[in-house]
Image (cartoon, rainbow, N blue to C red):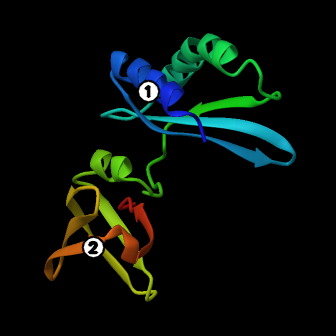
Amino acid sequence: MLDKALEDELSALAIANGAKLYDASFVKEDGNLILRISFYKEGGVSLDFCTFMSNLISPLLDVKLADMENYYLEVSSPGIERILSTPNHFGLSKGERLSVKLLDKSIVEGILLSSDDKGFVIETKEGEKSFSYALCKKVKTAFDW
């Protein structure tokens, strides 16, 4: 996990360039440390935008993370079908179709109408349904292919 100050700087750079910081975290894969940063942008995130943001934030990371072990930087979009795990993710996904897997293993699908710090509301075939984040095992966007 990145510290709040660095996350705030990355967020400010994203906003200044017409996007929003979706997620930023360190993961370990095959013995390699990877800093994964994803940006959300209305209309989608292009490869050119990822390259631009990577070049923009690399010098900042070189200074802020100078004492860290070597890591790889990976910049991307969050993807068309993505897991929603924070209130921010839900806020950025308003109007999108969601697949909600509840703790009781049932699955509900619908359009995200609203969200706050405690939960969210989707429009299903049966009408509006409210969910607490605590009752959800996994929530992801569901693209209609």
Count up the numbered dots: 2
Residue situated in front as seen by the camera: 143 or 55: 55
- Residue 51 picture quarter: top right
Chain-order first, disc 2 or disc 1: 1
Q: Find residue 69 and report its image quarter.
A: top right
Q: Looking at this view, is 4 or 32 the one in front?
A: 4
Q: Give the residue displayed 40% in from the left and 60% down from the top.
A: 145
**On the image, numbered disc 1 is attached to which residue?**
8
Compared with 47, 133 (above or below) is below
Name the amino acid, label 1: Asp
Q: Look at label 2 and name its amino acid.
A: Phe
Q: Where residue 76 sits in the image (x, y, percent)?
A: 55, 34
Residue reaching furthest to the right: 31
| Secondary structure of the residue carrying numbered label 1 | helix
According to the picture, the residue beneath numbered tag 2 turns out to be 131
In this rendering, which labeled residue sits more in front, label 2 or label 1? 1
- How would you rate the neighbour count of disc 1 (Cα within 10 Å): few for under 14, some for 14-19, many for 20 or more? few
**Residue 12 or 66: which is nearer the viewer?**
66
Examine the rendered structure and indicate whether residue 92 appears above or below residue 129: above
Taking the spot 54% from the left edge, 12% from the top edge, the residue there is: 56
Residue visible at 67% across and 35% down in the picture: 35
Q: Position of residue 61 (x, y in %)?
A: 64, 19
Question: What numbered label is drawn on residue 96?
Answer: none
Judge from the rendering whether residue 14 lies leftward or rightward of residue 63; answer left or right. Answer: left
Q: Find the distance from the CA under tag 2 to the CA under tag 1.
A: 29 Å
Residue 4, image x, y percentages: 49, 33
Q: Are marks 2 and 1 in contact (CB under 8 Å)?
A: no
Label 2 CA crowd tier, 10 Å (few <14, some 14–19, many 20+): some
